[in-house]
Image (cartoon, coloured by chain):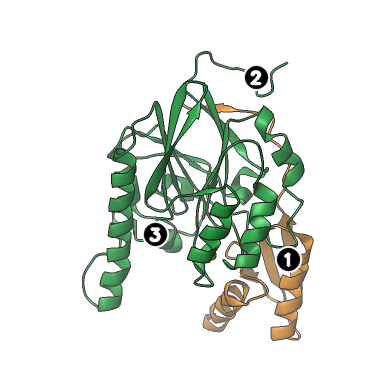
Amino acid sequence: MTNQIDFEAEIHRLLIEHEQIAEQGITVHHRENVVVLSGEVESTHRRDEICRQISSHFPGVAITCDIGITRAQAPSEVEEIS
Amino acid sequence: MIRIAAVGDVHVDKDVVGRYRPALEQLPDRADALLVAGDLTRHGTVDEAKCFATEFGGLGVPVVVVLGNHDHQSDQEQQVTEVLTDSGITVLECSATVLEIRGHRLGIAGAKGFGGGFAGACASNFGEREMKQFVGTTEEISARLGEALRSVRCDALVALTHYSPVPDTLVGEPLEIYAFLGCYQLGNAVDSAPTALALHGHAHHGSERGRTPGGVPVRNVAHPVIKQAYNVYQLLSESVDAPLVPA
């Protein structure tokens, strides 16, 4: 169990500290045989780079990527603050 | 009536330029100003700051920002600030500005803020030098934000930070990292002035709405939370339920 937690922590730090990634908002869950990534990033390039870097640093680890691209459409509503 | 658009954590680099622009081009029809709650860039480089200025500058409405922790990553926050300022973007750091909007004075006081935690689970200015420096930074930034807020004479006052002033808008984040996402001292600063609205980012998995202990509305406008290019908030309303885009 400790190894699993350490492994998740290592991936989490890689996602934040790696120069090509720098993502603090990605959730990492290490299931039995797979690492599940979730959260949102600003581009498909960033999502693909995350998977590429994890595969490169942890060869042999299966990755399931549920990372989405945050939508950037204009709003249709206004909130009145009172 | 004043309408302000707000977003945070847009993390602009070359790969993002152009993504926001179609929505931003519509912004002048929807709001009187745009406030950005930090993490404008990925690593806080000059090149990334230029990308942000390209994407978020020249909108036809005032743009007011604070920096976030990502914008400090390369230790170039001064150069980043200069790039933004040269592009006509107002950068606040424990400082304030006033915008004249249709006869109203909109005051905005801003600071990056810092971590430290919240009541019952906060760090203390005690022990190792490193710990005292950490909490000392929290206290100093919060005190200076409070001074900036109290210095403004305006019709509507907005506090703009990157870190959160309340735990309410962190719900969804792991409890263990709340202390790295904000601090109660920022909430005290917000409550020390007649603040109408407090905006922050940083908590990508957090919640949108909260209130300070003094009752000031708080909104987490981190992009992954609002899930659109920006939110629009209406202050000094003369009538309720006004349409976002006039017919």
**Mark 1 is on which residue type?**
Arg
Subunit of label 1:
A
Which quarter of the picture shows residue A7? bottom right
Q: Measure the alpha-carbon separation of dots 2 and 1.
A: 36 Å
Label 3 secondary element:
loop
**Mark 3 is on which residue type?**
Phe
Taking the image as drawn, is residue B213 in sight?
Answer: no
- Residue sticking out furthest to the front: B86
Label 3 Cα neighbours within 10 Å, binned few <14 / some 14-19 / many ≥20: many
The residue carrying mark 3 is B114
The residue carrying mark 1 is A46
Q: Are marks 2 and 1 on the same chain?
A: no
- Residue sticking out furthest to the top: B239
Chain corresponding to orange in the figure? A
B86 is higher (above) or lower (below) than B218: below
Subunit of label 2:
B
Tell me: B5 left or right of A54. Answer: left
Label 2 Cα neighbours within 10 Å, binned few <14 / some 14-19 / many ≥20: few
The residue carrying mark 2 is B243
Q: Measure the alpha-carbon separation of dots 3 and 2.
A: 37 Å
Taking the image as drawn, is residue B50 in sight?
Answer: yes
Chain corresponding to green in the figure? B
Label 1 Cα neighbours within 10 Å, binned few <14 / some 14-19 / many ≥20: many
Q: Are marks 3 and 1 on the same chain?
A: no
Tell me: B71 left or right of B130. Answer: right
Quadrant into which the N terminus of chain A falls: bottom right
Tell me: B100 left or right of B148. Answer: right
- Residue depicted at 67% across the width and 34% down the height: B27
**Mark 2 is on which residue type?**
Pro
Q: Measure the alpha-carbon separation of dots 3 and 1.
A: 26 Å
Q: Residues at badges 3 and 2 in contact (C-beta under 8 Å)?
A: no
Tell which circle, 3 or 2, labels the residue nearer the N-terminal end: 3
